[in-house]
Image: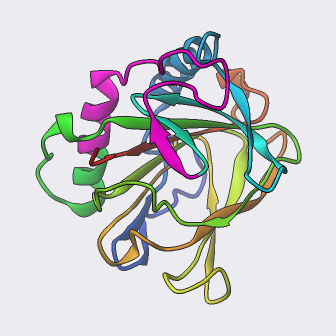
Amino acid sequence: MDDELFPRPRAEIAPGAVHVPGWLDLAAQQHLLAACRTWARPPAGLRTVRMPSGGEMSVRMVCLGWHWYPYGYARTVVDGDGVPVKPFPGRLGRMAARAVADAYGEEPAEAAAYDVALVNYYDRGATMGMHRDSDEKSVAPVVSLSLGDSCVFRFGNTRNRNRPWTDVELRSGDLFVFGGPSRAAFHGVPRTLPGTGPAALGLTGRLNITLRVSGL
């Protein structure tokens, strides 16, 4: 954020994995939050994801473009109300292309490639276990944007869920991009930090907007 006493530098956490603090200013965060609130409404709205084992994820999710369910993609909410998934907004594709370019210091790629958004809502106590994003047919970088409360983002290795890993604090407005050698890295959120989001944003909890290329 621009008003931080000690600005946080961008950092390459692993080859191809880049953290860009404060990528979204407050106005951009507010605009994105308003869109997320619209996307969360039914039909095809915010839902609790049930795993094949019978357990439930503690985060709640809404999908755009393609509907993700464990472990695949569909055009309808196959594990919910069964209606067509909400469309993927072109502006998110353009945002993803700009994010990758800013993270890697390159010219923006073709925006139309990004076609999936997973919007995860973390209420107090919600976590995300170590996993990797492996249901896509594309190896294009994953773009992750944070709104609201800060979290501990654990970025691991490509072999297993164990160490070595690096814990990064992601705050509201932060960008995290991972691709190339780190595209298949395990990652998760072991905890959020309630009450740390900017008061002016007006969000209780944390939102993570993950943008991907499905390759489907």
Give the percent coordinates (x, y) of residue 149. Answer: 73, 41
Q: Is residue 80 magenta?
A: yes
Give the percent coordinates (x, y) of residue 112. Answer: 19, 34
In this rendering, is residue 62 above or below 84? below
Front residue of 41 and 79: 79
Res. 153 visible in picture: no
Give the percent coordinates (x, y) of residue 33. Answer: 57, 22
Side of 116 relative to 36 (left or right): left
**Residue 165's quadrant in the figure?**
bottom right
What color scheme is it? Answer: rainbow
For the magenta stretch, what is the residue range?
71-98
Res. 23 visible in picture: yes
Residue at 34% across, 66% down: 179
Side of 100 relative to 73 (left or right): left
Q: Is residue 23 magenta?
A: no
Residue at 61% across, 78% down: 166
Residue at 29% across, 44% down: 216
Side of 199 relative to 45 (left or right): right
In this rendering, is residue 200 above or below 171? above
Front residue of 200 and 53: 53
**Residue 189's quadrant in the figure?**
bottom right
Side of 13 relative to 200 (left or right): left
